[in-house]
Amino acid sequence: MNNKGFSLLSALLALCLLAGCAAGGGSSACGSGAAPTPDNGVIAYVPLDDRPDNVERVDYLARSLGYTLEMPESGLYATKLDGQPLNQNGTRYGDRAALYEWVLEQEKAGCHRYILSLDQLLSGGLVNSRAMQGENPVALADGTELTEAALLEELLKSLSADPRNTVWLLDSVMRLAPTTGYNGFGLNEYNALRTYGMAPRPALSGANLTVERVAADYALGTDGRLIACSSDTPLPEGAVRNYLASRERKLQLSAEAERILSGPGYENFHLLVGIDDSSAEDSIQKNEIALLRRGLRAGDALLSGVDDLGFKAVAKGYLQQYAWQPILVHTDYFGGTEDRAACDYDYRPLGELVDEHLDFFGMTRTDKRAEAELQVLVLTQPRDGNKAPSYWQALIAQLNENEKQQRPTILIDASNGAYGTAFHDALVKECDPGWLLGYSGFLDMAIVTGTALSHGISRYVWLQNGNGGDTEANAAFLRSLADSVLKDFCYKNTVRDDLIAYVRDDLGGNANNFCTPEVDASAVQAKLESGMAESTGAALKSFSHSNLIVSLRPYTLRGWGGLTLSDYSFPWRRAFEIRMTIQPEALTSPHKKLLFFYT
């Protein structure tokens, strides 16, 4: 989108806002009944759940690309772990009826862009999609009761009635085991069922790839015999039966979505399926993946990662909406294990997943670094542990060389913590983290690739379209990049371990759920705030001396100002992740670099 196009977009968005289409939870309309404007920049979004990667970080990305996300009230899509206060609908999961009706309200009001999580709409969120079995009818406000399949079909039919609509549907392959701390499901059950799910199943193909046949073989090994579920502690009665029933229900609904989309009138609908908590084994997922992959249409995709689905939908939708020039991308790996899965929870080698994502975004890969317009640097686990420092040191050197040569760069840390804090310390001290187009390393390895590439590629195209002068978009990008770096460098590798030990040893609590047993919330909050105040100092100083790419041709930099962090909280009342408010100051003139230091 060029500057002239963005000015038009801004004007249309301003008109839409005046008509009552402001972003934020709880608003129920994308307009006031006036003639709809397909390019008003508003996306009606039903997230996977209420964790930061599915809410504010998707909002940051959307705003960095000139969009505004319209979302329902958070209580309608929140997940509550055991012992925590229930949602307003009296359950631990999202309100499927209210969300269905909310989407129809957006359509009635004139919205034309949608990103909708099927796990949320049909199951009340990702976690509950792993726990539901059988048929669970949805009762609407007017008393109408719909089966889940009927609700899905009615919703898609309603959205397809307007050919101006563009709809991204997000779905997932159920992971190898359900979520601990939900519906009484514990760590013993998780470990036992994950081992059970990893066992190889008979490989199905052709006419045998049906939901019924796949489900019938869930309990069978490659020899055709029943697989035993072994555990040091006996599993609760019916645990395996319920696990398999949840898988079958989930697969049935995914196959139903593909069946509906295969009909006429759904050309502007895109299905994006994610795979998470998987295995390189011929596991219980393999036939499910094969079945769903066969049902994909042109424009659909099945990729590694679930918590990055929102990022990928926003980025891909932006690339599809606006004209951009083909981009040559070069990838460098440091560590030597790109031929392996990045961790035990992924199902394909890291290098294959990176290439698969680049293909999804329409990038042209090149082996020649000098001719590439966009660089991707990936740190893998070390092939030789004795040479570990040399791997990340080589990456640091290449990153600094890329900056010197004005080569826009995306950085992916897929090392799964193998280098400790040394790599992150060097990035802060010897590099300019704010210069990156994208970074990821915080969450599970299955999603770091999609997260970094979604942000980096879309930012590159945003700049390619001449939008680097947009103040609001730049502020959103700064928040997004800072959030990713600070949570990885400071919280994950420093503060979180201390916090977990504090909750366990000092408070006698459970770091995976502060409500079982109940711990002193104010004490945990104080520990978080003091830890982040101490841990983020060096990174914040580095950002304040960083430069931001605001134009590609001519290549132009602006300086970062300071960052203020506040409002720390624990989204699911557990230590795994945090939420925080990031307030960037206005951009400055470019910072000058002297050796490794910026002024």
Image (spheres, rainbow, N blue to C red):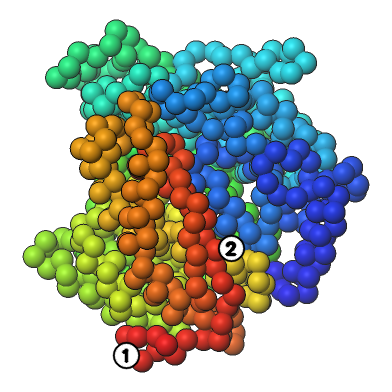
User: Relative to residue 538, is residue 120 depicted above or below?
Assistant: above
Nearer to the camera, 147 or 532: 532
The residue that appears at 15% across and 66% down in the rendered structure is 388
Q: Position of residue 158 (x, y in %)?
A: 76, 31
Determine the secondary structure under disc 2: helix
Q: Does residue 484 appear in this view?
A: yes
Question: Image quadrant for the N terminus?
Answer: bottom right
Q: Position of residue 413 (x, y in %)?
A: 32, 61
Q: Quadrant of residue 169?
A: top right
Work out whether mark 1 precedes mark 2 in sequence or the reverse, and give the earlier one: 2
| Residue type, mark 2 in image | Ala
Nearer to the camera, 64 or 89: 89
Q: Quadrant of residue 72?
A: top right
Determine the secondary structure under disc 1: loop
Q: Position of residue 378 (x, y in %)?
A: 33, 65
Label 2 CA crowd tier, 10 Å (few <14, some 14–19, many 20+): many
The residue that appears at 74% across and 69% down in the rendered structure is 6
Q: Say if mark 1 contacts mark 2, CB within 8 Å.
A: no
User: Relative to residue 552, is residue 32 depicted above or below?
Assistant: above
Nearer to the camera, 431 or 358: 431
Label 1 CA crowd tier, 10 Å (few <14, some 14–19, many 20+): few
Marking on residue 207: none
Which residue is labeled 1 in the image? 595
The residue that appears at 35% across and 85% down in the rendered structure is 597
Which residue is labeled 2 in the image? 476
Q: Position of residue 495 (x, y in %)?
A: 30, 53
Q: Quadrant of residue 465?
A: bottom right
| Residue type, mark 1 in image | Leu
User: Relative to residue 389, is residue 360 depicted above or below?
Assistant: above
Question: Image quadrant for the C terminus?
Answer: bottom left
